[in-house]
Amino acid sequence: MTLLQSRRLLLALSLGVLAACSDSGADKAATGGGAPAGATNTLEAAKAAGKIRIGYANEAPFAYMDSKEAKVTGESVEIARVVLQRMGINEVEGVLTEFGSLIPGLAAKRFDIIAAGMYVTPERCQQVAFSDPTYGVGEAFLVKQGNPKNLHSYEDVVKNPDAKLGVVVGAIEGDYAQKVKIPAGQVVVFPDAVSALSGVQAGRADAYAATALTINDLMGKTQDGSGLEKADPFTDPVIDGKGVRGYGAYAFRTDDKAFADAFNAELAKYIGTDEHKKLVAPFGFTSEELPQGVTAAKLCAGQ
């Protein structure tokens, strides 16, 4: 074989390897292995594959990466594992995504479920199909020790033009800030909760707004001497004449109604049981955070 022939052979082999390894992902289901033969929808594909991908935003206690265990965990993730196992889907693979990119990522089929404690709102209901909520909770502020700007509510930020409020991109707190008329120049947007905490420490924001559970979790993980505290007392914002209470749920693509309905049916059997309460207790959830009969239909209707 001549040198030229050898080079041509090597090139052909290289191109063959590249072709075998190349995959645009356009025809792959988010279950990770492509839709098995005969599967007509996401639910059937996930059952056949025995696994599914969930999108999460690394916000404790809802969904985050446990570095010690090297796995995704949290209230939303662990409930999903139980419900999906009951549906015949035994493996859950987490896809880390910025909160503001969760809905676009779901639509793009990077994953098949958003498991991030996402609040159900009428606006989001236009984009995704929600399960019924797994919890309900109020708001809180993370501030520097002593709360130097005396921020105990969203309205306090409005009253103080020098105060800056930190929110996570795409989170409901940004909507709250807008609706109580906090000027855009006083709102600092962070990619995630950890960045927001660091932002308050560094003075980029005077308060970080999040769910009370998120703030409790952050405070529980910060070391003494962090210079931070939870604003106490705190008053939830009043939106459209009502004090807010957020209700978190799972989100599915709107064309995955069969999947959402099947998931919701199993979820309804589980939420509020002793098994459920025991599962979520380590994440700071108590009976006070149960959704108390609030449904996605009511929330989507703005009730």
Image (cartoon, rainbow, N blue to C red):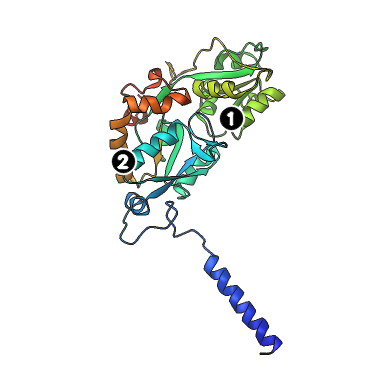
- Comparing 208 with 53, the one in front is 53
Where residue 163 sits, quadrant-wise, is top right
How packed mark 2 is, by other alpha carbons closer than 10 Å (few <14, some 14-19, many 20 or more), is few
Q: Which is nearer the eye, 133 or 266?
A: 266
User: What residue is rendered at 56% in x and 11% in y?
Assistant: 232
Residue 114 to residue 199: above or below: below
Q: Which percent across, then down, holds residue 242? A: 42, 16
Residue occupying image coordinates x 52% and y 30% = 60
Q: Secondary structure at mark 1?
A: helix
Q: Nearer the viewer, residue 292 or 3?
A: 3
Find the residue positioned furthest to the bottom: 1
Sequence-wise first label, 2 or 1: 2
Q: Position of residue 53 (x, y in %)?
A: 44, 46
Q: Which residue is located at x 38 percent, y 29 percent? A: 134
Left/right of residue 158 with respect to residue 287 in the rendered view: right
In which quadrant of the rendered image does the C terminus lie?
Answer: top left
Coordinates of residue 289 in the picture (x, y in percent): 40, 21
Location of mark 2 (residue): 86
In front of the other: 32 or 180: 32
Mark number displayed over residue 193 = 1
